[in-house]
Amino acid sequence: MWVEVILWAKDLGKVVADFGPLKIHLGEDGELMLFAPSSVSIVDSAGLRIVCQAHLCWPELGILCPVTLDSLIVMVRPSIESRPNGDALVFKVDVEGPDLVLESSAVDGRVVELLNKEIQAKHVEPSWNFAKTLGHIFPLPGFMETAASLGLHVAWGETRITSEAFVFAVSLYAKIGRRPEGGEPQVTGRSRAETSEATMAR
């Protein structure tokens, strides 16, 4: 069995618009201010493309006064990553520069590279451990002599990106935890302490 979530471009646009203005601290004293997007679109097989105006102030680079960045492009790229505590849906954020227009010569072409390094260093990548959230063990009542629990587990997750929507699908499977005669309940996916707590709760 599986579940699927579809986020349409117009819905994503509304969510992104609510973020503006968004301030991101850079280095020790710098900041990047992102304003409401002028456009939000989905790039097929890539991610969410956000175009907005921004103000940059970064004393470490010699930028003491805010510099206006017109048509700054921010890409949000969803992916599935395997992590020690379960698979996660991760949204990686990076800045692209083809439409980057600077109103001051104080900033050269290195700004995009430096911004991305700073974003990576600060781990600006929202994530969701969906394997942990969606997986669950349901203890069964004691009068069920052979079945101790019903477990719902995540098998895998995947993302699909089209020009119209972002699709997130999760495959799930169920497993019964057996209760041996005269022994403790065998609950798949739980520690012995968790099993004891579930038994007492009944």
Image (cartoon, helix red, strand yellow):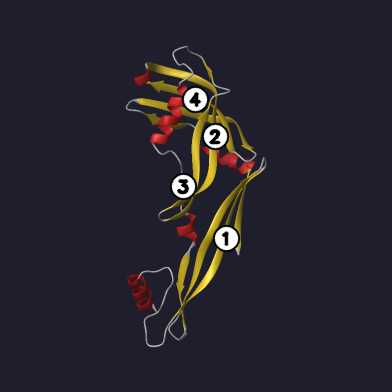
Instruction: Give the residue type at disc 4.
Output: Ala
Looking at the image, which residue sits at the far top?
105
Q: CA distance from mark 4 to mark 2?
A: 14 Å
Please rate how many residues cluster around mark 1, counting C-alpha atoms within 10 Å: few if below 14, some from 14 to 19, many from 20.
some
Q: Marks 1 and 4: in contact by CB < 8 Å?
A: no
Secondary structure beneath dot 4 equals strand
Q: Can you identify the residue that label 4 sits on?
A: 54
Q: CA distance from mark 2 to mark 1?
A: 27 Å
Secondary structure beneath dot 2 equals strand
Disc 3 or 4, which lies upstream in sequence? 4
Q: CA distance from mark 3 to mark 4?
A: 24 Å
Secondary structure beneath dot 3 equals strand
Disc 2 or 3, which lies upstream in sequence? 2
Disc 2 or 1, which lies upstream in sequence? 2
Mark number displayed over residue 127? 3
Looking at the image, residue 173 lies above or below residue 58? below
Q: Give the residue displayed 37% in from the left and 19% down from the top.
A: 61
Q: Can you identify the residue that label 1 sits on?
A: 171
Please rate how many residues cluster around mark 3, counting C-alpha atoms within 10 Å: few if below 14, some from 14 to 19, many from 20.
some
Q: Give the residue displayed 38% in from the left and 35% down from the top.
A: 121
Disc 4 or 2, which lies upstream in sequence? 4
Secondary structure beneath dot 1 equals strand
Q: Is residue 13 left or right of residue 28?
A: right
Please rate how many residues cluster around mark 2, counting C-alpha atoms within 10 Å: few if below 14, some from 14 to 19, many from 20.
many
Instruction: Give the residue type at disc 1.
Output: Ser
